[in-house]
Amino acid sequence: MIDYLLKNYDKIIRWTTQHIEIVFITLVFSLLLTSLIIILTSLFPKTKPIVKGLFSMVYAIPSLAFFALMIPLTGLGRTTTIFVLVMYNQTILLNNILNGFDTINPPIVEAARGMGMNKLQLLTKILIPLSMSSIFTGIRLAVVSSVGITVIGASINAGGLGTLLFEGLRTQNTVKLLWGTILASLLVILFNWLFKQVETRLKKQQIS
């Protein structure tokens, strides 16, 4: 295994970099879309169950089937993978963020309304600041999920560590399979740890 790493470290670095890039780009677009949806549901509360139900249905679609559905529209490669990941992330992010809003004490919300805050002010000055821990929990789970599903994205030429895994499967090369699995797992552990640290600090700040 070490011999393969030494001979192919340049490829491994490239695939790892591609993997991280896809996850990062996905996170940015996911947060942008989630922000728009949160504003929509804040202005029009009746849309909340419709939106949550819609994205729950999307989340239930198997990733390979979702990729296959999108290929005629967006083609092979990163674009399709990122689009699918962004759609999957909405369920994770929305559930955590909206649940975080629901855990805020009602008297705080009522007091803010009594002070004359409109819906957007309530969202930006009360709901979001008091739900930062839940928001980062959602981000952490979305990133971890994206790392895993990006592996499957290699089956449609998206690149990333899944390339190593699929090459191993195609050539029945155990070393490639092991390195692909190990590196993808390490990314999951790393991102999970990093965001967990942020969550812990936010929780301590909220308690204090």
Image (cartoon, helix red, strand yellow):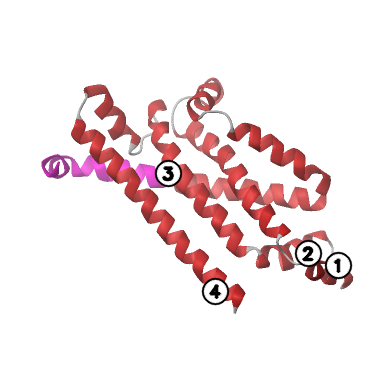
CA distance separating discs 1 and 4? 27 Å
35 to 171, vertically: above or below: below
Give the numbered dot on residue 204.
4
Q: Secondary structure at mark 1?
A: helix
The stretch of residues the image draws in magenta is: 1-20
CA distance separating discs 3 and 4? 28 Å
Return the residue at label 1.
113
Return the residue at label 2.
122
Name which of mark 1 and mark 4 comes first in the sequence: 1
Name which of mark 1 and mark 2 comes first in the sequence: 1
Name which of mark 3 and mark 1 comes first in the sequence: 1
The residue under label 2 is which amino acid type? Answer: Leu
CA distance separating discs 2 and 3? 34 Å
Find out whether the residues at labels 1 and 2 contact each other: C-beta distance under 8 Å: yes
Q: Secondary structure at mark 2?
A: helix
CA distance separating discs 3 and 1? 40 Å
Q: Residues within 10 Å of mark 3 (few under 14, many from 20)?
A: many
Return the residue at label 3.
147
Q: Secondary structure at mark 3?
A: helix
